[in-house]
Amino acid sequence: MASLGGNILPPDLHTKIYLAGIAVLLLVGLCYSTLLKKKEKDGENGENPSLAQSLWLFFYSCFLKPHDGDHNGNQQDALESFYKKQAGAYDATRKALLKGREDMLALAAAQLAHRAKNGEEKKRCVWVDVGGGTGWNIEAMSRFVDVSQFFDSVYLVDFSPSLCEVAQKRFERLGWKNVKVICQDARKFRLEDYEPTPEGKRASGSPMRSYFFQERPKHGGADLITMSYSLSMIPDYYSVIDSLPSLLAPNGIVGVIDFYVQSQVDVSFRNYTGGLINRHVNFFGRTFWRAWFDIDRVALEPGRRDYLEYSFGTVLNVNTRNYVLGAIPYYIWLGTHKRLSSSNLPHEIVEKVDALVTESPYLHPANHSDALSRAVERAAPEIRSKAWDAAIVNISANLPLPSFFYQNQHCRIYYDDQLKKHTQFNDEYIYAFTWEDTRVDERILKLKPDDVVLAITSAGDNILSYALQSPARIHAVDLNPTQNHLLELKVAAYSSLPYEDFWKIFGEGKHPDFRSLLVSKMSPHLSSRAFQYWLSHHHIFTKSKGGLYDTGGSKHGIRIFRWVSKVFGCRSAVKEMLESKTLNEQREIWRNKIRPALLSRLVSKFVVSQEAFLWTALGVPKNQLAIIEQDHAASEAVRGPDARAKNTRSHAIWEYMVNTLDPMVESTHIAADNPYYLVCMDGRFSPRCHPDYLAPHAHARLSRPDAFEGLRIHTDEIDEVLARLAPGTLTVAVVMDSMDWFDAGADAAAAAQIAKLNRALKVGGRVLLRSAGLRPWYLDEFERRGFVAKCVGERSPGRCIDRVNMYASCWVCTKRENLPPPTPDLESAAGPEITSLRI
């Protein structure tokens, strides 16, 4: 037997099979290619190849066929070398590869529809599809708008004659006369060569003369420019991107979808990208996909996307993966002109948004823009928002503004999502619904049209309840970005969805078409970061089990309740309780079937009293726990003549639970009028029992175009927001139980916040707070710093403070005097120099 020599072993059976398979594949491919060539010579052009032929053409063109179009140094020849043989099969073979095109088109269509509804009337609507290929995108757009009626003109610009030929036949078949196929280098395409000028004539002169000797305009007439998987195939991408602003209308939208690879190190310091969720691609992915696509001259270097984001202002940004084909990274990006069209000077936009954030007066100059800067500086020289700080840095560096400035709605205020104070929450909200009884808040506060309210966002339910009372302004504040994402989603749903869809999402916590509604309806009303978050978490609303109210940190408490009821065999009793017709029937079920299990000492000691559970499931921090233990130690249950409890944590928590749940069950009918416990027990609200913001009349009121004009959503600490509000502008501050979180042993932090509340509030302004203590220690700090404290609710054994009954007391602290230095009178702060400006 002959030897292969040296240390080389003969191939094993698996290797032989593998090599034989490759040989057979190449042989079949060679025969198939020969057959195809013969059919072409016989007059069969292969315009509509079969699926097998299409797949083979794709494989052959991408991996086997050599590129033979480079000898002339012509990009068009190179494209033809790649596309000519597979032009007829292009659409059939790209469906699985080019994912997300429908999403990009839906997002663009939603933006156009929103702007058309809320903007000025336009005579013409124009779309330019750069690198449009076979025209698949334009036909696919018909799912979202009537292309033949919505657009006056559609221009498909591509450099491949073979693909343009397929596109031309497509639109002849569809009968769309408004679509024009332009086989041209995208760098040289000028809309004015095809669109009528304002005088009704087209630009004259040769294309060469027009290109070299006429200055390109800063704005064009295209309402929409799209690039679908074409930017990565353009060698000279800088000049193409540079040419787009001259095509784009002042309020137009650019939509791009393409492959990419990038490390988070490249972009983590940029504040204008619209969020970084899923943007990072690991080292292996970056190396593999760049090498893989480089075979077909598809360039995935990060510079293409970076230059696009630098050249325009980001409206929406999505980073995702094509999991059908090995998790290929791709992005969807929507942008607009870098310099906002609503003003000639970017600083005027910044001034206006800054005034909306800080409650400073926005002085609109009647004649001269410079007057604006001088007037605002004189009016409140020390009050500047973080949005202002970030915008000034970007403008001075010729960078786009942060994406918040390009949103259709300016309610969400800029924040740096990379700060540790925001990332500590790991992209998870704690509260899926709010635990404060809005009915009691409304009775205590009695908000008026001139009130300016600051409140903690939580799940946003209370913010929406305040909005129903139509105060002048609401500042919603939360350090957790995702809590504000939830409020944004509710506001967007009001603005874009009918009541039936709104109820399914937030009443039932589920909607099978949530993703579609998010993309095609709600997206124009969301900030880029909020949209990124909900697109990546759309399963919350679409999965068969769970739903919105089985998410967030509070889900752990709800799941523990379900687990306890299951272990103790009282799940059926819970169902009976929810179906009870009367309060007496509910009481009997609670006393005999549910209470013995839920309020057992065993559950209290080993589950509920654990510090980790209290924080994760119920949002009770250790300082608030200390207040509960302190009150328990001084209570009648421990020190009274008939003491029944020990001075331990488990006993303190058990007593607190008893004082919370027993009176609540005895005095409120859960199925009829206690939505807070209904959602805990059933995982959803009911048409009979729900928060006031879910009522049909609330939707009718808050779905009006100007319903949220006064809303500002701050992602920051309360201290930071208070420090940047103009003094003496707030009338109401609702801080919930946040004061309980301060350390009683180091009261300087609490005292500092109280001083800032005094500075921001008008004399007579009120602070509404709740506490786990009967008389919390920080009330003395309020009274030392210009407030008068009044108890407006106190829980006692057997009596409810409200329908939630979770807190021991409720207080209103009214500002009676200013702390030095005195709060300035803003009405006279501007002085006589600016009396010629109108406010």
Image (cartoon, rainbow, N blue to C red):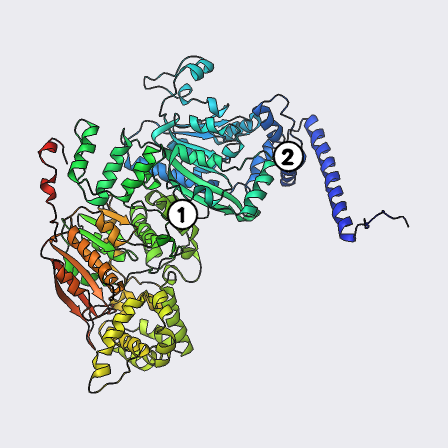
Q: Residue at x 46, y 45 (%)?
A: 264
Q: Circle 1 is placed at which residue position?
A: 532
Seen in the picture, residue 311 relative to 110 is either above or below; the reply is above
Q: Circle 2 is placed at which residue position?
A: 61
| Structural crowding at the residue carrying mark 2, measured as other residues with C-alpha within 10 Å and reported as few (<14), some (14–19) or many (≥20) | some
Residue type marked 2: Ser
Q: Residue at x 34, y 42 (%)?
A: 524
| Structural crowding at the residue carrying mark 1, measured as other residues with C-alpha within 10 Å and reported as few (<14), some (14–19) or many (≥20) | many
Q: Residue at x 12, y 65 (%)?
A: 790
Which type of secondary structure does the marked residue at label 1 adopt? helix
Q: CA distance from mark 1 to mark 2?
A: 36 Å
Q: Position of residue 394 (x, y in %)?
A: 34, 36
Residue type marked 1: Gln
Which type of secondary structure does the marked residue at label 2 adopt? helix
| Residue placed furthest toward the bottom | 642
Q: Position of residue 142 (x, y in %)?
A: 44, 37
